[in-house]
Image (cartoon, rainbow, N blue to C red):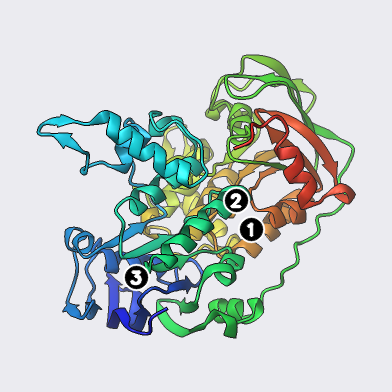
Amino acid sequence: MSDDVILSVSGLSKYYAKVKALDNINLAIKRGEILALCGENGAGKSTFIKLLTGAEAPSHGTITYDGQTYQELNPILSMSLGIAAVYQEFSLIPYLSIAENIFYGREPSNGPVLKRREIFARAQKLFDDMGMHIDVRQRVCDIGVAYQQLVEILKAVSRKPKFIILDEPTAPLTLKETAIFLNIVKKLKEANTTIIFISHRLEEVFEICDRAAVFMDGKFVTCKDVKDFTMKSLIASMVGREISGDYPEPRKTTDEVVLECKDLCNEHVHDVNFVLHKGEIIGFGGLVGAGRTETARALFGADPIKSGEITLKGCKYVPKNPRHALKCGVGLIPEDRKSQGVLLGLVVRENVVFSSLPKYLKMGFIIDSKREKSATAGYIKELNIKTPSMEQLVRNLSGGNQQKVVLARILSTDCDVLIFDEPTRGIDVGAKQEIYQLMCELANQGKAIIMISSEMPELIGMSQRIYVMSEGTITAELKRGEFSQEKILEMASVGRKSA
């Protein structure tokens, strides 16, 4: 790695009204290095990269890139300088194919005629080189979140950038996809590409990064070689306190069956059988595309059920739609909180009460604003939602706090069965601990919880039983004493074609 600096910032600040998202940041990034940008949700990491890519303009300070100093950048200028970014929020066009998304605006053509065969061939090669076998002619709206993330990454890589920013790129990926992706990052480094890498999976930071810079509450804390950190000291720098790595222990479950699923089938899953007890947390493990999210959506009434039988609290349960599921006491916290979880254009208060609005009506049609505000304030306190006020737009909150708003909305419905789909995806270590604690408290109150997770330590640490899925069906049920990463991965690969 060369010691010359490719990018530096001086006094970089960004204010949103009275909120200081970034405050006087000074940082130099070396050419060809992988720099980890670490911090809790709301530390200022995403704001920082938006300034570097020109998505937003700084309030104060300068950016120097390749020896040229700028008061601000813009997206076209950043792109021309060889700066590319993969954000947490996808920028894909749903009804175009994967290949068309990757080369959108750069399609090879003969005059006005697009070379469609070449577009598909080049896109297919990108995926094949990454070890991911997928038909690039599929529309983006027809693939899952994990594959959409891979499309975003390859879209950036296809530009052959000199400087690439990766904001939580592995958050929706399983261990297998993550390993493939990290190998691609190493290849980019070998080509002398400079990389800013943001990940709450800190083991990835220690695996591939040269240095780590830490932000807290919009301020720069420290920057040093990764080898000079321990996991414990890095976390302490990020959160300003020590965090226990232990998972909270829920109390023993009862024998009372709350939810039982027999031979559930629809377009995506088949012959799904499992039981869930009162006060129990069960985990669903498996690779991307195994059918875990599809099972959750079927239980929540988001996807139609073709056959099979579901029993909820001893009664036959046929969810007609999500509203009906909530009314019956089944709630889903989805993996894609941006498009399915929160209403970004509404404020925190409106989001929290959205699914339980009838509870806050007087005479059937007038909102009791006092009760509504009181309930919202209670959830903000209980879940430690960091927001200037309950009237703050949810789009302006960090990812972790948006996730807590989704939790508050579902909790306000007082459901007996709660389905958490990737509950800590893209969330920092401090917020993860809070969500783990909340899940155990809910289980101790008698709530029955299904947790879908691609993070193996989380799956093993939080679950009392684990169901493993592959190819749309359950391939194993593991009790706590039987848990092992190797066993879960083995059963997650049953019936899968080798790559």
Depth check: 178 or 172 in front? 178
Relative image position of residue 492 (x, y in whole percent): 71, 39
Relative image position of residue 119 (x, y in whole percent): 29, 35
Instruction: Tell me what residue is drawn at x 26 percent, y 29 percent.
Output: 116
Say whether marks 1 and 2 touch (CB < 8 Å): yes
Measured Cα–Cα span from mark 1 to mark 3: 26 Å
The circle drawn on residue 423 is: 2
Q: Please give the residue where the numbered disc 3 appears in the rendered image.
A: 48
The circle drawn on residue 456 is: none
Would you say 488 lies left or right of 363 here? right
The earlier-in-sequence mark between 2 and 3 is 3
Relative image position of residue 446 (x, y in whole percent): 78, 45
- Residue 498 lies, with reference to residue 129, above or below; the image says above
- Residue 73 lies, with reference to residue 412, above or below; the image says below
Q: Using a 10 Å C-alpha cutoff, classify the residue at mark 2 as few (fewer than 14 neighbours), some (14 to 19) or many (20 or more).
A: many
The residue mark sitting in front, 1 or 2, is 2
Would you say 222 lies left or right of 414 here? left
